[in-house]
Image (cartoon, grey):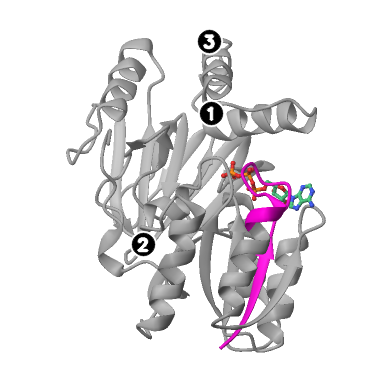
Amino acid sequence: MRAVLVVNPHATSTTGRRRDLLAHALASELRLAVEQTNGRGHASELAARATEAGADLVVVHGGDGTVNEVVNGIMKAGTGTRPMIAVVPGGSTNVFARALGVDPDPTGATEQILEALAERRLPRRISLGLADDRYFTFNAGLGLDAEVVHAVEEVRGSGRAISNSLHVRKTLRHYLTGHGRTARLTLELPGREPIPGVHLAFVSNVDPWTYWEKRAIRTNPGTTADGGLGVFALTSMKVPTVARVVGQLLRSGEAPPRAGALIREDDVPSAHVRCSEPVGLQVDGDYLGTRSEVRFRSVPGALGLFGPPAETDTPAAGD
Ligand SMILES: Nc1ncnc2c1ncn2[C@@H]1O[C@H](COP(=O)(O)OP(=O)(O)OP(=O)(O)O)[C@@H](O)[C@H]1O
């Protein structure tokens, strides 16, 4: 099997030593080429080139941003049969990998790939989300979360470390200063009347939406990587509503969050959001700037994920 290992040396938890160990372990079973990214967008180029050259597998060692770039590179490659992907987590949160049952520990994830090779396991076909022309693996969002992603990216760009508490501070600041308080969105879902007066809209490709440390934050527990998209949108940003929904998300288990101002759908094929004025869009934690409208679509069975057994993607709440 021909494989390319794409490593982001700048992701939060990748190291040269780990890259070498991973490459050594994989090279014993695969015809492996190792590529390091040199900046934003390079992982996409490497993945597109691997696809066009007929690689069977692209192994990503990096965070969610690198996984997203690789997936977009594969999906948008000019020619070639799409290779499978495998992930060895090297980022800070690694939402996609964890949601799909990849071992969060890089050594464990490498073992999963080697086991899958030894067992000649078939890849799991997974759906992807598409936000206009950008594929996403775990979530996209318009409004408050995009503005928080943008603010956190600016901190990271200045060379400072990012943390969960920074995310909380930025979220509170944006909420309290009124960002996201104006209902600028109209949400259109298949078979429903357009819903005006929406403040923020999260669209998920998998469950959970994200993780807080080890805790899964589940906006759409009924959304799976085998099905359509999950939609989670708020028509009120009043303190009691937000406090209630955030409380439910932090306690999240199997029961989906509920509130009068909460629109929640699982397994929808598409969603269309129109904005009365441009609103920030984030895709897999990458801020893409502002948009006046976004069409979201599920792309069923788009890619093969190699490594973890299919049954391991049930996120434990608060484990
Ligand atoms: N050589 C490089 N130098 C600087 N930045 C890079 C390099 N290669 C890739 N990048 C960029 O680094 C960004 C972050 O990478 P990635 O998501 O892999 O790690 P992370 O941010 O630590 O993980 P997470 O997304 O889980 O927090 C990506 O958007 C990517 O474009």
User: What x and y, as percent, mark residue 30?
Assistant: 58, 83
User: What x and y, as percent, mark residue 271?
Assistant: 43, 54
Q: Along the line of sight, which residue is nearer the eye, 292 or 75? A: 75
Say which amino acid is labelled 1.
Leu
For label 2, the SS is loop
Q: Earlier in the sequence, mark 3 or mark 2?
A: 3
Q: How much space separates mark 1 and mark 3, taking CA atoms?
A: 11 Å
User: What x and y, as percent, mark residue 226?
Assistant: 33, 67
Is 173 placed above or below 210 here?
A: above
Q: Check disc 2 and report the residue beneath it.
A: 225
Camera-side mark, 1 or 2 = 2
Q: Check disc 3 and report the residue beneath it.
A: 176
Q: Residue at x 58, y 11 (%)?
A: 177
- Which stretch is magenta? 1-18
CB of mark 3 near ligand 1 (< 8 Å): no
Residue 208: quarter of image: top left
Is 301 placed above or below 254 here?
A: below
Whether residue 127 is visible here, answered yes or no, is no
Q: Along the line of sight, which residue is nearer the eye, 7 or 255? A: 7
